[in-house]
Amino acid sequence: MKPIQYHSTNNPSHKVSFETALLRGLAPDYGLYTIPRTDIPRLSPQLIRGMREMSMPEIAFEVLNPSIGAEIPKKKLEALLQDAYSEDKIPTRMEKVIDNLYIMWLTDGPTYSFKDYAARFYARALNYFLEKRKQKRVVIVATSGDTGGAIADALYGLDNVINIVFYPKGSISEGQRRQMTTLEGNVYAFEVNGDFNVCQALAKYLLGNKKFAQEVFGDPDRFTSANSISVGRLLPQAVYPFFAYSRLPADGKPMIASIPSGNLGDMMGTVIAWQMGLPIAKIVCGVNENKEFPEFLRTGKYKVSKTAESPSSAMNVNHPSNLARLFDIFGGHMFDERDSVTKKVIKEGVIKVPPDRNAMNRDIFSVSIDDEQHYKTMKEVYDKYGTILDPHGAVGWRALEIFLAHEQSLRDNPAVIYETADPGKFPDDVKKALGITPVLPPEMQAQANKQERIYSVNSEPTHIKEGTKERLELSDAQVEEAKQEIKKIFKK
């Protein structure tokens, strides 16, 4: 099996192995490692049909082995995936709501979020390569809600890894916060004065700062990422679209995948699954009031605005990292312009080469769901079907409804909505919509009584005025405060 080379979105000629891409996190030129469209492996229709008889770990092996099997021996990869995705650890439910409408519940893992799927694979693959190399890494993560808890849980207790998580202060739920702040051990949670965009910029800055890594840890390559930035998070998100299709009626009709989206990792994984041969009629990408992506599809112009705070908090992302990968797939090039000396981002989302927007619109439908529609959809679905959606799932549901109103010809195709978080993680929103309080998942009940360990970046972000609006950017003061705090914790 010939190894696949993963290239940087900023320089397709810069190619590395999966192992190198995983350990680095971000390319040296600040691009995201991604799989070239021409190298995406194709699965045969016979194999895809045969997945109806397979478990999730077995499906994961068939999907991931063509991309990474040259670097992880078959038996090792099978064991790794069995450990990551066994039904007793992370069961996956398909609920038929009515006729050809389904919900895929990706919500029953350790942190009750779909992020557990990619996190569990990422952690085990990282640990495999680190043990092989006898090395250590500091995994730096920015989170808008669920990513931080999932990554922290997956990495917790691993001997070769330290985990630093940045989250926006006051913008995530208490339950989401506690999934990071109560673990302690090798998990260090930082609350940041700002939005997710500021957290993500801080994570990217540190990931590219080899001098700081050398100063603190004596190793310029010590930092890596577990965000959607990491190719180790991207690839496993191609697995559960195959699982969803395998559990649909065997009539051969391509499915519609409706995905509530923030940083676009889940959508990007589904795009890869489609390129691998999975029968998909359309990818529906529902976003909240952070509408940069659907506006780009509509107008061809990309403008980053201030992050909007919506009930679907894990999707409060105004500049999705995975858009660079999506542009790459569709023949374009997007990058963040950086200061030549400080390497700080000075202009986000610069389009150097436009992608094939006609092809993107042919394959993907994206729409913004406002806050009122979040709650209205949750209420309507509960009253009609007795199903409690979380705010993110409500975005997926409503986006599908809007799409089907436009595309009557696809109404008979099976449609799968990705439900990405247990409603119990959002008790206030569920109560506001339905008048009832959902049950808090068991592990979160236990975490509610545990002591928290929180580090802070209190400095003000930079406020950028754009007409009557304002957006936030990472400030020099925040960078310096974060560096000093990390030095206090780790420098010997």
Image (tube, helix red, strand yellow):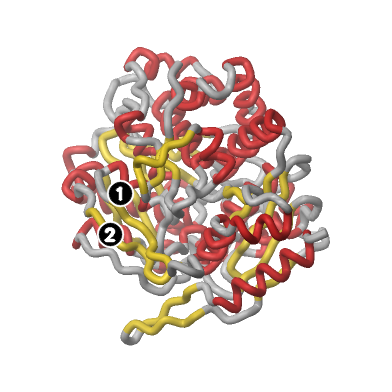
Q: Which residue is mark 2?
A: 351
Within 10 Å of the Cα at label 1, are there few (<14), some (14-19), or many (20+) other Cα atoms?
Answer: many
Residue drawn 52% across and 69% down? 198
Within 10 Å of the Cα at label 2, are there few (<14), some (14-19), or many (20+) other Cα atoms?
Answer: some
- Figure check: 83 above or below 403: above
Left or right of 207 on screen, residue 447: right
Quarter-wise, where is residue 409 in the image? top left
Q: Earlier in the sequence, mark 2 or mark 1?
A: 1
At label 2, the amino acid type is Ile
Left or right of 268 on screen, residue 422: right
- Figure check: 348 above or below 180: below
Q: Quadrant of the N terminus?
A: top left
Residue 335 — which label?
none
Labels 2 and 1 touching (C-beta < 8 A): yes
Query: How far apart are labels 2 and 1 at the CA level?
Result: 9 Å
Q: Choose mark 2 or mark 1, whichever is in front.
A: 2
Q: Residue 194 or 210: which is nearer the viewer?
A: 210
Q: Which residue is mark 1?
A: 327
Residue drawn 58% across and 53% down? 146
At label 1, the amino acid type is Phe
Q: Residue 423 or 118: which is nearer the viewer?
A: 118
Residue drawn 20% across and 50% down? 357
